[in-house]
Image (cartoon, coloured by chain):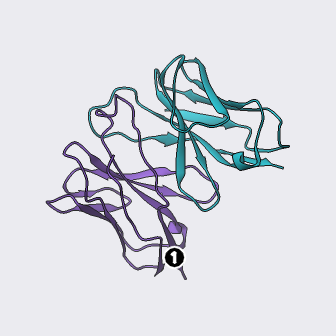
């Protein structure tokens, strides 16, 4: 069966510090990978998605970046965190080949607090 | 991508049936309708997906009228553990280039009371 891991689970970082969040998927090959952010009491905002190694698309311009160094590894980074980067970060995957219906599978999330 | 509109919040009591309606007037021919459930501090979880008429699984039922401009998620005999946020999403992953670009709105906060 497929599983998705995220770490760390929680993180408190000062403004201006760097960030690295990691997501890995097991039990599947060539998944589509996604990074979302959720502010308190709000819906999910799609940040990045990837359909393959080294292929990253950004949905929202900001000080965050993403990389996919391996097929089942997705990394979210920042060189300098802002207060507005605080939130709940979720990684998700979906099968790469779709024929209409599909679903995304979400990881446990990382709660980031920028102080 | 079709925009969806759903109630911000709903209240219910244990044992009752809950129906959450979502409007998607601009749904496209190839779009599917998907519902997710999210508990606090967890990622969303897929509940059900449909294209037209009625779909039922072990968790919920999804009713989609012929014009597909709305859909209703039905949760039978809710319990306290069904308290969560429910998201209605509309999209066509094939048209989106082979990946599943879903737009999550604010969702409906369902509170189930004893």
Label 1 crowd bin: few (<14), some (14–19), many (20+), radius 10 Å:
many
Is A9 situated above or below A22?
below
Q: Position of residue A58 (x, y in %)?
A: 53, 32
Is residue A108 visible from the viewing direction of this image?
no
Q: Residue at x 34, y 26 (%)?
A: A97
* Relative horizontal placement of residue A9, taking residue B66 as reference (left or right): right
Chain B drawing hue: purple
Front in this rendered view, residue B15 or B12: B12
* Relative horizontal placement of residue A87, taking residue B113 as reference (left or right): right
Q: Residue at x 39, y 66 (%)?
A: B6
Q: Which residue is mark 1?
A: B112
Q: Position of residue A60 (x, y in %)?
A: 55, 39
Q: Position of residue B103 (x, y in %)?
A: 43, 48
Is A27 situated above or below B3?
above
Q: Residue furthest front?
A: A61
Res. A98 image quadrant: top left
Q: Position of residue B40 (x, y in %)?
A: 62, 60
Q: Residue at x 55, y 34 (%)?
A: A3
Q: Residue at x 78, y 34 (%)?
A: A80
Is B29 situated above or below B71?
above
Helix, strand or loop at disc 1?
strand
Chain A drawing hue: cyan
């Amino acid at each position: 069966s497929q599983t998705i891991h995220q770490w760390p689970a929680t993180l408190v970082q000062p403004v201006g510090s760097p960030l690295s969040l990691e997501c890995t998927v097991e039990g599947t090959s060539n998944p589509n990978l996604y990074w979302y952010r959720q502010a308190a009491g709000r819906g999910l905002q799609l940040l990045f998605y990837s359909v393959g190694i080294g292929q990253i698309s950004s949905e929202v311009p900001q000080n965050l970046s993403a990389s996919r160094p391996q097929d089942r590894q997705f990394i979210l980074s920042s060189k300098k965190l802002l207060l507005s980067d605080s939130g709940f970060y979720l990684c998700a995957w979906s099968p790469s080949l779709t024929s209409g219906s599909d679903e995304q599978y979400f990881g446990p999330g990382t709660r980031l607090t920028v102080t | 991508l079709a925009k969806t509109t759903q109630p911000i919040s709903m209240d219910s009591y244990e044992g009752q049936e809950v129906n959450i309606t979502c409007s998607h007037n601009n749904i496209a021919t190839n779009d599917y309708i998907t519902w997710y459930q999210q508990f606090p501090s967890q990622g969303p979880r897929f509940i059900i997906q449909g294209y037209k008429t009625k779909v039922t699984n072990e968790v919920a039922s999804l009713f989609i009228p012929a014009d597909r401009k709305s859909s209703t998620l039905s949760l039978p005999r809710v319990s306290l553990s069904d308290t969560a946020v429910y998201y209605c999403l509309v999209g066509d992953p094939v048209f989106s280039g082979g990946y599943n670009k879903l737009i999550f709105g604010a969702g409906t906060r369902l509170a189930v009371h004893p």
